[in-house]
Amino acid sequence: MNRRNFIQKAVVTAAGVSGIAPLLGEVRAPQSIVPMPQADEQFWKELRKQFPMPEDEVYFNTATLGAPPRVVLEKMVQHMRMLAESMARADYHGNGPLLLSGYEPYVELRKKIGLLINADYKEIALTQNATFGMNYVATGMELKAGDELINTNQEHGGGKGAWEQAAARYGLVYKQATVPVPANDPQEIVDNIFALVTARTRVIAVPHIISAYGVVLPVKEICHRARELGVFTILDGAQAVGHIPVDVQEIGCDAYYSSLHKWLLAPAGNGILYVRKDVISNLWTAIASYEWKNQEDPGYRLTQRGTGNPSLIVGLEAAVDFHNEIGPRKVTDRIKYLGDYLRARVQQIDGVKIFSSVHPAMCAGITTYGIDGVSAIELQRQMWVRKKLQPRPMGDKMLRHSVHIYNQEHEIDAALEIVRDMAR
């Protein structure tokens, strides 16, 4: 699919015609459109029209929640309207719409997601968010008093809460490995984690990308080394899928969970849990429903979670199709490019401290920084008042700046101009 055709379809969609990819189309491997140099801003300017945010407002907070493209919203809203209009036609004999999610296997959608992260669909469960995935594993494992588990000191609350509870409930030994701030040495992180490993260590649960600082951890080395020691690994990928390339087979983790309403731009309330086929059958179902004993499709039994909104699933599939239509690697390369563009220039401003990593392999679309003597809340306020730019303060000293495909260089330049002014 060439750039011209994509832009033409984008303009048509912006005018209100339905999506850039068939919602129920054939499952296929993600394909990139013809590669283009990052300097070709016309493509990205046209793509920005796919998002309903006002053109003069700039969203730099994808690490909290992604901005869904127009096609995702349209598919979801149209589906909700169809359900409201057609509910009486559902007779439970194969006629009428499917009124509920939470009970269906969604095989085709799980196959599409499997292609994104290199997993079999039976290893994938659809969840509400990353926190659900963590809890499914933490409450589903057979752990006993004295077993040890390792987190880091940089966990999101949704990445450690279930483990802290399991430790308190079952008498587990809970440890935290130190990740320095800023973190620019991947080997130091690996060494800090495995310095805590003993013969009683059962679980290593760490972020793929640290939420507060955007640090990409050396997860492949961590997981492969843990596998050699017989230690179960689970990765918090809340900030990863759609942000950086994710290949769970190459990484070698036992489990991986993510929130797809961040970087994959799905509607809020969509997540996944991957559990490796060799171990998924050993995991108890934290929320048991009809299929709780289904070992033929264990991802399905973990997907069952009671009544949900099927329109969110429609929105999720539209987001996956949108991502694939552009090209997954094209998306992640663009995010990395914009993140590097921001970091290279922030580092040149006197009085500004970067809390994120600047190691090429340990950073992508999130940059956290602060100005000496200026509160992050005031910096955020000035960006909005002056230029309608919206990053997110992380406490009083740090501003987290997330970039995605709906952002452009000139918007980053506008933010940097304000940073320079306030640093002076």
Image: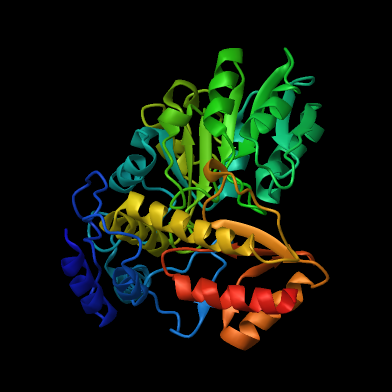
Near-viewer residue (240 or 283): 240
Residue 139's x, y, as percent?
A: 64, 34
Near-viewer residue (113 or 97): 113
Near-viewer residue (292 or 232): 232
Residue 326's x, y, as percent?
A: 29, 59
Residue 143 visible in the current orientation:
no
Q: Quadrant of residue 11?
A: bottom left
Question: In screen coordinates, is 78 left or right of 199?
Answer: left
Residue 132 visible in the current orientation:
yes
**Which quarter of the rendered picture does the N terminus lie within?**
bottom left
Height in image: 400 above or below 120?
below
Question: In screen coordinates, is 232 left or right of 15?
Answer: right
Height in image: 362 above or below 281?
below
**Going 46% across and 48% down the picture, which residue do you hit?**
244
**Which quarter of the rendered picture does the C terminus lie within?**
bottom right
**Going 62% across and 87% down the picture, which residue do you hit?**
386
Residue 134's x, y, as percent?
A: 60, 41
Near-viewer residue (263 or 294): 263
**Going 30% across and 75% down the picture, which residue do you hit?**
46
Residue 97's x, y, as percent?
A: 28, 63
Question: In screen coordinates, is 193 left or right of 222?
Answer: right
Question: In screen coordinates, is 213 left or right of 3?
Answer: right
Height in image: 402 above or below 31?
below
**Going 26% across and 58% down the picture, which residue do you hit?**
325
Height in image: 288 above or below 33?
above
